[in-house]
Image (cartoon, rainbow, N blue to C red):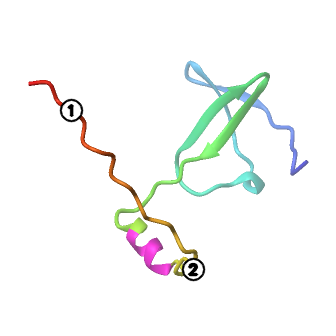
Amino acid sequence: MGIERQVRVFKNGRNRAVRIPVEFEFPGDEVIMRKEGGRIILEPVVKAKKGNLIEWLRQQQPIDEDFDFDIQEPPPRDVDL
């Protein structure tokens, strides 16, 4: 298992809160919170930048596999007008 640390829960208005220790720091200001059984899991939200996909695709190595694109057209169907 990874790093583990006991922390205190405190009230923040009507909510309960916990401070995230520095060793559990993550990028960004937002997280996704979900409950699995008795566990509460926090995951950082990763936001994609505009144009990022195109830049990423340009950095990828060409695919050497040979794909079979021999697609046969189905025969025309009879249509009842």
Against 81, residue 69 (above or below) is below
Left or right: 1, with 16 as reference point: right
Q: Position of residue 22 (x, y in %)?
A: 73, 55
Q: Position of residue 10 (x, y in %)?
A: 70, 27
- Identify the residue at horizontal 74%, vertical 52% (top origin): 24
Membership of 56 in magenta stretch: yes
Magenta part of the chain: 54-59
The residue that disc 1 covers is 78
Q: Is residue 29 left or right of residue 11?
A: left
Residue shown at the point (52%, 80%) measured from the top left: 62
Q: Main secondary structure of the magenta part?
A: helix
Residue 37 image point, x, y percent: 77, 22
Determine the image quadrant of residue 33: top right
Q: Amino acid at mark 1?
A: Asp
**Above or below — where is 65 with respect to 76?**
below
Q: Residue furthest top?
A: 14
Q: What amino acid is labelled 2 in the image?
A: Asp
Q: Is residue 75 magenta?
A: no
| Residue 69 screen position, x and y as percent | 44, 65
- How packed mark 1 is, by other alpha carbons closer than 10 Å (few <14, some 14-19, many 20 or more), is few
Seen in the picture, residue 77 relative to 56 is either above or below; the reply is: above
Q: Nearer the viewer, mark 1 or mark 2?
A: 1
Which residue corresponds to the image point at 14% horizontal and 24% vertical from the top-left? 80
Query: For numbered disc 2, what is the local secondary structure?
Result: loop
Labelled disc at residue 11: none
Question: What kind of element bears circle 1?
Answer: loop
> Which residue extends farthest left?
81
Tell me the residue that label 2 is attached to.
64
Mark closer to the chain start, 1 or 2: 2
The foreground one among 61 and 44 is 61
Instruction: Check the image and name the residue furthest to the right.
Output: 1
